[in-house]
Image (cartoon, rainbow, N blue to C red):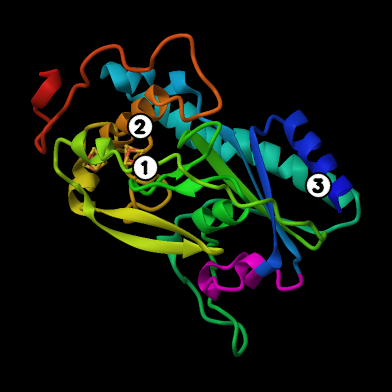
Amino acid sequence: MEELKESLRSKAKELGADLIGFASRDRFGELEEKHNPFAIFPEGKSVIVMGRRITRGTLRGIEEGSNFSDYTMFGNHWLNDEFVAISCYDLVCFIENMGWEAVPIFPNPPEAGATGVPVRKGRPAPNVCPDFDYAAVACGLGEIALNGQLLNPDFGSLHRLQMIITDAPLESDPLFEGGLCDGCGECAAACPLDALDIENAREITICGKTMRIGTYDSVKCGVCKNGAFANYLLKTAQPDRKAAACNRACIVCLEQRGALSRGFENEFRKRDPWQLDLLGRPAGRGE
Ligand code: SF4
Ligand code: SF4
């Protein structure tokens, strides 16, 4: 089993994946059917979560406030729809060449919900959209931080993930021990719209690992002009906040603490961050 995992790890790396983790079926027993990967492949035995990094430089134009469009391609659409998807598809082919069935899963927003009717009694309505945060934690890839982002020890929140469900038996990776999010509150403090409440954070437990998550004011985040983008797959789903002021503050914080395994010659933040208010007018420290 370990030999199979090693060959998948090394193939994924060859295919350009920066992240890969494994979890066996028993780690998904507590997950509701409508977000459970094994509702899609009931005879599956394992889940693989793999992905690629968002390069730090992809956020440079947003950090400087001078280019917002290139992030949406290299950091979001192209990365999801092409770069990660191609690595995922090629890994799926590699697994099927070994005689195991492999189901590729795209990270559709969980809010997409059911759009059909159950085809038989006791089955969930399509489309089941697996919970990627749950799966990534179950695969040992990281922890969910107070700002709701999945933090990975190598790339922090800068990654895009896809999933493979397979009938290959694969042993679970150890859960990530945690400690990347130290509760500093910089994410909430950086929001010009006061849209992130971390004082009343709720607790979630995944595979016995408990994490605290703050609450966003989705209405404010939906109109935020500080680097947040509407979900390009579903307008009503949570926006993409990876490049937003709240998450860029977290990137700075992780970097300053040396919390990630990877470092850079120069700091990400070069000057006070800019801020725009609800109406898109310059406000705050970067004014
Ligand atoms: S900024 Fe601090 S509190 Fe917020 S998510 Fe990052 S590490 Fe956690
Ligand atoms: S997305 Fe915008 S409004 Fe929402 S918490 Fe982040 S910075 Fe604030």
Residue type (three-letter) at the residue carrying disc 2 = Ala
Element carrying mark 3: helix
Q: Nearer the viewer, mark 1 or mark 3?
A: 3
Circle 1 sits on which residue? Answer: 240
Q: Can residue 81 be seen in this view?
A: yes
Residue type (three-letter) at the residue carrying disc 3 = Lys
Among the two numbered marks 1 and 3 on one chain, the one whose residue lies closer to the N terminus: 3
Residue type (three-letter) at the residue carrying disc 1 = Asp
User: Which quadrant holds residue 29?
Assistant: bottom right
User: Which quadrant holds residue 283?
Assistant: top left
Is the residue at mark 2 in contact range of ligand 2, meaning its CB lies under 8 Å from it? no
Circle 2 sits on which residue? Answer: 243
Left or right of 3: which side holds 173?
left
Residue 5: which disc? 3
Q: Return the residue found at the far bottom.
A: 121
What range is drawn magenta here? 27-43
Expressed as whole percent of the image width and height from the top left, the position of residue 281 reads 9, 28
Q: Nearer the viewer, residue 167 or 28?
A: 28
Q: Is residue 265 placed above or below 122 in the rendered structure?
A: above
Q: What residue sits 53% from the left and 77% below the top?
A: 125
